[in-house]
Image (tube, rainbow, N blue to C red):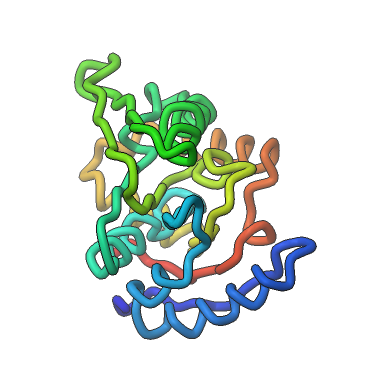
């Protein structure tokens, strides 16, 4: 696993000893290999679904990239950054992923990622995801996007100062004017939906850089 990504602890999924046991087994696997974690993920129709959530700049993309690169089989990665309809679209982006990606994927149908063109600030192309693939969803709002689905939920966290530094460095100034607004929007979303480490199967200490 990449340096800087350390599993800190697992939490019990309410009312499910099997999920609690799975989480503990996956902690041990994730310490050694993202691919091992993928092999243990919950299944829907024989396919695995993983949601990676947490505040901006914590390292969600880093973890998602590591898992997908080492994934033991065909997998699709969907980033909420692809879908948010603008800087005020966190809630809407999660809802779009739930409706157009997770729901059809769970039925075994073609899923469609309705991308957002950030340059044009307008809807962009639609990307299709073939049935039968494992699915990793990453980004602020991922837990909400998989609400009600059987999924491995991973929460990635880091200190506020280091999150901000990592996010602003990563986006080379493009994020600077929007950081405060986005972080406040994220906090409102988390308060409304209950997204937190307490709802995760795994909690990961992450660093983006």
137 is higher (above) or lower (below) than 38:
above
Tell me how many marks there are.
0
Please report the residue visible at 61 percent of the width from the left and 74 percent of the height from the top. 10
202 is higher (above) or lower (below) than 56:
below
Residue 181 visible here: no
111 is higher (above) or lower (below) than 18:
above
Residue 31 visible here: yes
Depth check, front residue: 194 or 104: 104
Depth check, front residue: 199 or 205: 199
Depth check, front residue: 109 or 62: 109
Depth check, front residue: 22 or 108: 108
> On the rendered structure, is 199 left or right of 91?
right
Please report the residue visible at 44 percent of the width from the left and 32 percent of the height from the top. 104
Please report the residue visible at 26 percent of the width from the left and 52 percent of the height from the top. 169
Q: In the picture, which quadrant includes the C terminus?
A: bottom left
176 is higher (above) or lower (below) than 47:
above
> On the rendered structure, is 194 left or right of 105?
right
Residue 126 percent across, percent down from the top left: 26, 24
Q: In the picture, which quadrant includes the N terminus?
A: bottom left
Residue 69 percent across, percent down from the top left: 23, 65
Please report the residue visible at 33 percent of the width from the left and 41 percent of the height from the top. 131
Residue 40 percent across, percent down from the top left: 47, 72
Residue 100 percent across, percent down from the top left: 43, 27
């Amino acid at each position: 696993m990449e340096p800087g990504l350390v599993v800190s602890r697992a939490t019990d999924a309410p009312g499910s000893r099997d999920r609690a046991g799975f989480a503990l087994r996956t902690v041990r696997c994730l310490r050694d290999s993202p691919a091992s974690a993928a092999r243990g993920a919950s299944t829907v129709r024989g396919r695995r679904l993983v949601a990676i959530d947490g505040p901006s700049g914590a390292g969600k993309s880093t973890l998602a990239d590591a898992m997908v690169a080492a994934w033991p089989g065909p997998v699709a990665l969907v980033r909420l950054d692809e879908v948010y309809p603008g800087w005020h679209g966190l809630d809407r982006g999660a809802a779009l992923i739930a409706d157009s990606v997770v729901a059809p994927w769970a039925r075994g149908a073609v899923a469609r990622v309705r991308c957002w063109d950030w340059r044009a600030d307008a809807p962009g192309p639609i990307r299709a995801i073939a049935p039968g693939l494992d699915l990793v969803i990453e980004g602020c709002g991922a837990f909400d996007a998989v609400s009600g689905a059987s999924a491995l939920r991973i929460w990635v966290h880091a200190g506020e100062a280091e999150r901000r530094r990592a996010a602003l460095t990563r986006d080379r100034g493009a994020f600077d004017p929007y950081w405060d607004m986005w972080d406040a929007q994220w906090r409102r979303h988390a308060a409304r939906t209950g997204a937190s480490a307490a709802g995760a199967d795994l909690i990961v200490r992450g660093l983006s850089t």
